[in-house]
């Protein structure tokens, strides 16, 4: 013989559940209102991360998860830049990882759109911001090329290679080949130093000059090679480590390039 639970028992349990859910609901509602009415810029990193995660994981205790993420990675920027395996190891579900990747890509596309619409060389601060967002927190070296048209607007940003913590291979002829395929008139080379120190190594300087020597006779200008650290950057042109336009002679342009393959290094690991 079964005994039906009293209606009051059901009501009591429901009231208890609602009592635990209500504070979370109220907090999330408050965060949504702050985001919309006061502006996202007024929310600290941990609250922005909470909004992002509870949007894709409405039933998860995101407050605890956010604290664990910030303890593990250090900042919102590093959470957004973390790879899929690292995010999964930190306890994020597939929907949450997708949400992180979505937010990061939207931000990068927004920044990239500005570089498509105006001369990159006249928007240097925006370029540095974009490069920082793209690779400053990568745990391995990445070598990117920004291909520019005759008006110095961005045609395309491509990652040519992804290497190790202190090295990435650079195939000089592949750089030039791709520039010709895209009809680029100029290039900006970019890579990161995972150590955070953007000081250029001898290999960084050497491979840049190899590319310049091959590109010049083809009418392709290499404006700069940017090295991105964590919150810092170095410009080989500003440091006087690559020739300026006025110093390029016919002899320089015709010089033979050293190997078709070289590499860039983070000297702090060599």
Image (cartoon, rainbow, N blue to C red):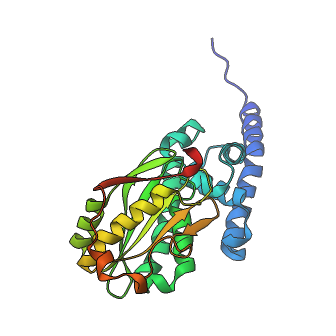
The one nearer the camera, 77 or 204, is 204
Residue 70 vertical position relative to residue 182 in the rendered view, above or below = above
Residue 191, image x and y in percent?
47, 60
Q: Splitting the image into 4 quarters, where does residue 252 fall? A: bottom left
Report the number of numbered marks.
0
Residue 173, image x and y in percent?
26, 61
Q: Is residue 21 left or right of residue 198?
A: right
Query: Which residue appears farthest toward the front when viewing the image?
Result: 251
Q: Is residue 104 left or right of residue 52?
A: left
Residue at 72% x, 47% y is 63
The one nearer the camera, 132 or 65, is 132
Let me know if residue 184 appears in the view. Answer: no
The one nearer the camera, 194 or 84, is 194
Residue 147, image x and y in percent?
35, 73
Q: Splitting the image into 4 quarters, where does residue 69 fall? A: top right
The one nearer the camera, 71 or 239, is 239
Residue 204, image x and y in percent?
47, 59
Residue at 67% x, 23% y is 4
Residue 146 vertical position relative to residue 56 in the rendered view, above or below = below
Q: Is residue 189 left or right of residue 231?
A: left
Q: Splitting the image into 4 quarters, where does residue 5 fall? A: top right
Residue 22 vertical position relative to residue 211 in the rendered view, above or below = above
Q: Quadrant of the N terminus?
A: top right
Query: Which residue appears farthest toward the top when viewing the image?
Result: 1
């Amino acid at each position: 013989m079964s005994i039906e639970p009293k209606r009051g028992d059901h009501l009591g349990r429901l009231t208890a559940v609602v009592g635990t859910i209500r504070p979370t609901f109220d907090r999330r509602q408050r965060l949504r209102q702050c985001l919309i009415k006061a502006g996202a810029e007024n929310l600290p990193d941990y609250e922005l991360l909470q909004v992002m995660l509870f949007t894709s994981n409405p039933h998860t205790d995101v407050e605890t998860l956010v604290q664990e993420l910030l303890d593990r990675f250090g900042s919102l920027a590093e959470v957004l830049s973390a790879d899929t395996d690292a995010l999964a190891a930190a306890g994020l579900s597939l929907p949450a990882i997708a949400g992180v990747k979505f937010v990061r890509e939207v931000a990068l596309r927004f920044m990239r759109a500005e570089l498509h619409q105006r001369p990159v060389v006249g928007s240097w601060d925006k370029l540095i911001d974009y490069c920082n967002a793209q690779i400053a927190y990568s745990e391995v070296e990445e070598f990117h090329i920004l291909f520019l048209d005759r008006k110095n607007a961005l045609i395309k940003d491509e990652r040519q290679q992804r290497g190790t913590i202190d090295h990435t291979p650079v195939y000089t002829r592949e750089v030039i080949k791709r520039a010709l395929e895209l009809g680029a008139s100029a290039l900006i080379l970019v890579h990161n130093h995972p150590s955070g120190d953007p000081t250029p190594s001898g290999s960084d300087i050497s491979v840049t000059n190899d590319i310049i020597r091959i590109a010049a006779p083809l009418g392709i200008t290499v404006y700069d090679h940017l090295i991105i650290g964590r919150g810092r950057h170095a410009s080989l042109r500003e440091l006087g480590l690559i020739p300026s336009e006025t110093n390029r002679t016919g002899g320089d342009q015709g010089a033979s390039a050293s190997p078709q393959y070289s590499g860039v290094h983070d000297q702090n690991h060599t």
